[in-house]
Image: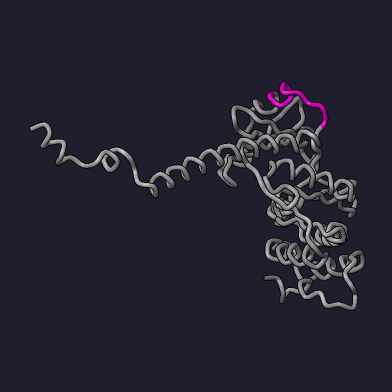
């Protein structure tokens, strides 16, 4: 009876061992998992190494100081680029600072195919603008570290004291004469600094009225100082044309305070300082080509 039962049973190879295709598929899954985990670990190590090479000697205690700093959220933490990013406003010893905190928030480029922290990229762009003579928020602290398997990054900048965004200013000003004179001066200054940015093939990438700040250099003076913020999307293009076309088209859509008179002033100043060929058409400087 036992012999009969054994004779009716399935062969051992079919009952207990998977087929060759199944084995190969399982082997592929295991290899893929191990490769993915290994690549992620190596990627994070390389990202930290890249950012460490370019920063000053700053300790973990400095990082913890800024990371644990509490303030009001200017930009609530949001999930982007596979990570988390948010901005807080903090008061420290009577001064105001903006602290951007990110976790696993990375980007890639031809120079960094494995990726690097977007805060490191933004810090570099802030330094580029400073070298070009374009006002930006002062960088007080910028650092990246690997903490418990996550890439943490911080960028702390000092408040632009005395500056106001174009968006906030246009909502508060009521005197039409002041509005006209200020916008005239602002248009001239914008034409000057944007031509300087584009001449080096740098594109701001996010030229909204809330990202353009200005202040009068002296009380009662028509001289304007302009500063640019939010350089996270700033990148270098292959040509001046590409950088110019993108930024000016974008600014035309998002600067409702500027009338055609002001755009005329901007265009005149921009052409005066720009390296763009005067004999070549620049259609994006006209209102009919703002899309």
Verify whether residue 63 appears in magenta. yes
What residue is at 82 percent from the left and 65 percent from the top? Answer: 239
Name the one closer to the observer, 59 or 113: 113
Q: At which x and y percent is residue 201?
A: 83, 60
Residue extending farthest to the top is 61
Residue ID at (17%, 40%):
9
Residue range corresponding to the magenta coloring? 56-64
Q: Which of the pair 15/194 is nearer the observer?
A: 15
Report x, y in % for residue 133.
90, 49
Quadrant of residue 152 in the image?
top right
The reply, left or right, for residue 37 in relation to residue 162 is left
All told, the count of numbered labels is 0
Query: Vertical placement of 41 versus 203: above or below?
Result: above
Quarter of the rendering containing residue 46: top right
* Residue 270 lies in the magenta-colored region: no
Q: Is residue 50 visible?
A: yes
Question: How far across and down, in percent of the image, does residue 177 sit?
Answer: 81, 60
Question: Can the viewer see residue 230?
Answer: no
Q: Nearer the viewer, residue 176 or 110?
A: 110
Instruction: Kindly give the residue lying farthest to the right in the view shown.
Output: 272
């Amino acid at each position: 009876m036992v012999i009969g039962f054994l004779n009716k049973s399935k062969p051992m190879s079919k009952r207990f061992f998977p087929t060759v295709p199944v084995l190969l598929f399982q082997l592929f899954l295991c290899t893929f998992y191990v490769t993915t985990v290994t690549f992620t670990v190596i990627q994070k190590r390389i990202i930290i190494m890249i950012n460490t090479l370019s920063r000053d000697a700053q300790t973990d205690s400095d990082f913890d100081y800024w990371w644990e700093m509490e303030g009001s959220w200017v930009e609530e933490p949001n999930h982007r680029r596979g990570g988390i990013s948010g901005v807080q406003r903090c008061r420290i010893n009577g001064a105001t600072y903006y602290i951007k905190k990110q976790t696993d928030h990375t980007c890639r480029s031809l120079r960094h195919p494995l990726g690097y922290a977007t805060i490191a990229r933004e810090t570099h762009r802030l330094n580029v603008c400073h070298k070009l003579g374009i006002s930006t928020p002062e960088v007080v602290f910028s650092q990246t570290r690997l903490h418990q398997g996550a890439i943490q990054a911080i960028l702390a900048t000092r408040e632009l004291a005395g500056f106001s965004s174009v968006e906030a200013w246009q909502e508060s000003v009521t005197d039409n004469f002041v509005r006209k004179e200020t916008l005239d001066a602002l248009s001239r200054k914008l034409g000057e600094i944007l031509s300087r940015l584009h001449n080096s093939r740098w594109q701001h990438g996010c030229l909204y009225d809330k990202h353009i700040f200005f202040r009068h250099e002296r009380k009662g003076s028509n001289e304007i100082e302009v500063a640019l913020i939010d350089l996270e999307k700033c990148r270098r293009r292959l040509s001046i044309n590409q950088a110019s076309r993108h930024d000016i088209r974008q600014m035309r859509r998002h600067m409702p305070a500027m009338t055609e008179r002001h755009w005329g002033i901007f265009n005149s100043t921009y052409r005066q300082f720009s390296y763009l060929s005067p004999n070549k058409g620049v259609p994006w400087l006209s209102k009919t080509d703002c899309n």
